[in-house]
């Protein structure tokens, strides 16, 4: 089921956008098939390889749902100028309202509209503003939801024992000094990156003109994927950082209990 859902996520823009706005359907189908197969193989295997926190719900579910909501809503918005319906009108109106509310000086939404070249159509600028505002809000909402899961639902210990090897397969606890300090350092770095990226990406594109062909945003499918990545990646990094800080906190608590028990035994 996880593999099918990932394949559906990758194919969603091609399914929701009209045929006239969809290109390279064969490549999309291939990518959806590969994504579904990789997800199935990762979760079917008893030995983890690259997907972290696979046995610590609901982190990965929240990541998936936030990206699904972002891509689905942005696809409906991109469909509105081509084939308007009641649902696309609702999505576009919501995104347009949020985009204008967040389009103030030095905001991420304002910066991403400033990076667009003069050759981009005015309709595309409005669409980028609306899509960026909606994607940014969904990303912030997913981070807030995970913060709630940690501090109110007591993630991850509420689901039982937490296995560091299964949930952090790319993290080697035997190298690089104390594991708690490393987790805290990496967690803070991920949170800082997640907070900075929405500002840094438009600024980098402005400083390096020609690095990215922004006229491609005139294509609805390209716009959906680029804005979705811009909104989802920083939120995922912040959630990963929060998760690593939480794991470090749990290890530190376990150490304190072990030290307290050892001192009690010695005193007895």
Image (spheres, rainbow, N blue to C red):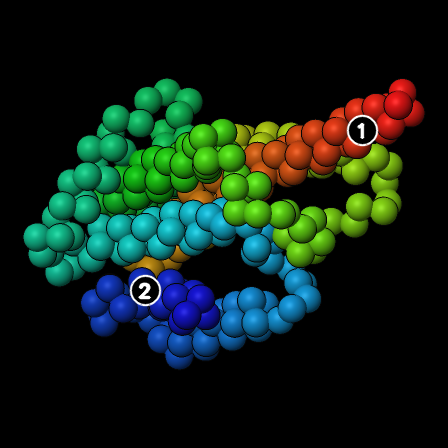
Q: Is residue 148 above or below residue 157?
A: above
Q: Is residue 2 left or right of residue 78?
A: right
Residue 182, given in percent of the width and then of the height, sits at: 76, 35
Residue 163, given in percent of the width and then of the height, sits at: 67, 51
On the image, numbered disc 2 is attached to which residue?
12
Q: Is residue 43 left or right of residue 232?
A: right
Helix, strand or loop at disc 1?
Answer: helix
Residue name at image x 49 percent, y 29 percent? 151
Residue name at image x 66 percent, y 31 percent? 249
Residue 76, image quadrant: bottom left
Q: Which quadrant would the C terminus be assigned to in this image? A: top right
Residue 257, given in percent of the width and then of the height, sits at: 75, 29
On the image, numbered disc 1 is attached to which residue?
261
Residue 176, given in percent of the width and then of the height, sits at: 85, 40
Residue name at image x 24 percent, y 64 percent? 16
Give the number of marks: 2
Q: Which quadrant would the N terminus be assigned to in this image? A: bottom left
**Residue 9 seen:** yes
Quick one: 86 or 111, which is closer to the camera?
86
Quick one: 71 or 115, which is closer to the camera?
71
Q: Is residue 207 above or below residue 2?
A: above
| Residues tagged 2 and 1 counted as in contact (Cβ below 8 A) | no
Q: Is residue 11 above or below residue 147?
A: below
């Amino acid at each position: 089921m996880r593999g099918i859902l990932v394949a559906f996520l990758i194919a969603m823009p091609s399914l929701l956008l009209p045929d006239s706005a969809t290109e390279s359907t064969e490549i999309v189908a291939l990518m959806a098939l590969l994504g579904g197969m990789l997800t199935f193989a990762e979760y079917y295997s008893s030995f983890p390889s690259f997907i972290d926190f696979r046995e610590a719900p609901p982190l990965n579910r929240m990541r998936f749902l936030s990206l699904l909501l972002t891509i689905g809503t942005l696809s409906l918005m991109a469909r509105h100028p081509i084939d308007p319906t009641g649902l696309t009108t609702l999505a576009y109106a919501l995104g347009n309202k949020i985009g204008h509310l967040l389009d103030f000086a030095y905001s991420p939404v304002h910066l991403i509209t400033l990076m667009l070249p003069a050759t981009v159509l005015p309709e595309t600028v409005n669409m980028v503003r609306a899509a960026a505002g909606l994607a940014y809000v969904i990303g912030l909402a997913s981070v807030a939801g995970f913060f709630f899961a940690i501090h109110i639902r007591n993630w991850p210990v509420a689901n039982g024992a937490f296995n560091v090897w299964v949930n952090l397969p790319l993290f080697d606890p035997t190298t690089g000094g104390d594991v708690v300090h490393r987790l805290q350092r990496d967690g803070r770095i991920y949170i800082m990156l997640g907070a900075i990226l929405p500002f840094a990406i438009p600024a980098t594109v402005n400083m390096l003109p020609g690095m990215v062909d922004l006229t491609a945003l005139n294509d609805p499918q390209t716009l959906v994927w680029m804005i979705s990545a811009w909104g989802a990646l920083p939120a995922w990094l912040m959630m990963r950082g929060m998760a690593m800080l939480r794991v470090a906190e749990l290890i530190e608590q376990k150490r304190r209990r072990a030290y307290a028990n050892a001192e009690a035994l010695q005193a007895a």
